[in-house]
């Protein structure tokens, strides 16, 4: 697939909520996208970095909880449907509680 250890990649989510890795290698004739670099985050204070890390952890835990709820309440579904239902629950919770 052309990817190797430490290759730059981007996470892409399709219309069904499927997450996939996209190789960031330039395509001939394409204009490269400018991605945020690590140096852009170096000016972030240690406290802000901790807050971001905490938020990401909380959101990961919420999504994991949504997946478990689907597993416990919905039967006979495909993995794609499981992920789609959990994603819907996750987004709904974020909107309802302004997360």
Image (cartoon, rainbow, N blue to C red):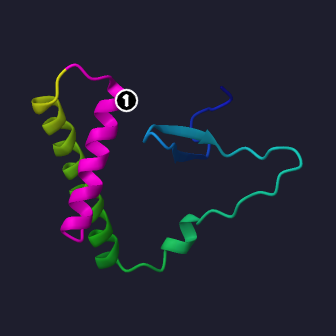
The image quadrant where one finds the C terminus is bottom left
Judged from this view, the residue extending furthest toward the right is: 29
Determine the residue positioned at 42% across, 78% down.
Answer: 44
Residue at the extreme left: 72
Identify the element where label 1 is drawn: helix
* Residue 96 painted magenta: yes
> Majority secondary structure of the magenta segment?
helix
Is the residue 34 above or below the residue 71 in the image?
Answer: below
The answer to whether 35 appears left or right of 67 in the picture is: right
Q: Which residue is at a point 20% across and 50% down the rendered structure image?
A: 61
In this rendering, the answer to whether 45 lies above or below 37 is below
Residue shown at the point (87%, 44%) measured from the top left: 28
Rendered location of residue 83, percent (x, y): 32, 36
Look at the image and give the residue range highlighted in magenta. 76-99
Residue drawn 10% across and 31% down? 72
Left or right position of 76 against 4: left
Q: Quadrant of residue 91?
A: bottom left
């Amino acid at each position: 697939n052309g990817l190797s250890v430490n290759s730059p990649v981007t996470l892409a989510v399709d219309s069904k909520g499927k997450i996939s890795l996209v190789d960031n290698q330039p395509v001939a004739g394409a204009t490269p996208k400018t991605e945020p670099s690590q140096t852009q985050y170096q000016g972030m204070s240690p406290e802000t970095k901790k807050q971001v890390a905490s938020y990401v952890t909380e959101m990961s835990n919420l999504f994991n909880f949504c997946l478990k709820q689907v597993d416990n309440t919905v039967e006979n579904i495909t993995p794609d449907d499981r992920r789609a239902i959990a994603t819907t629950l996750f987004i709904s919770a974020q909107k309802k509680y302004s997360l």
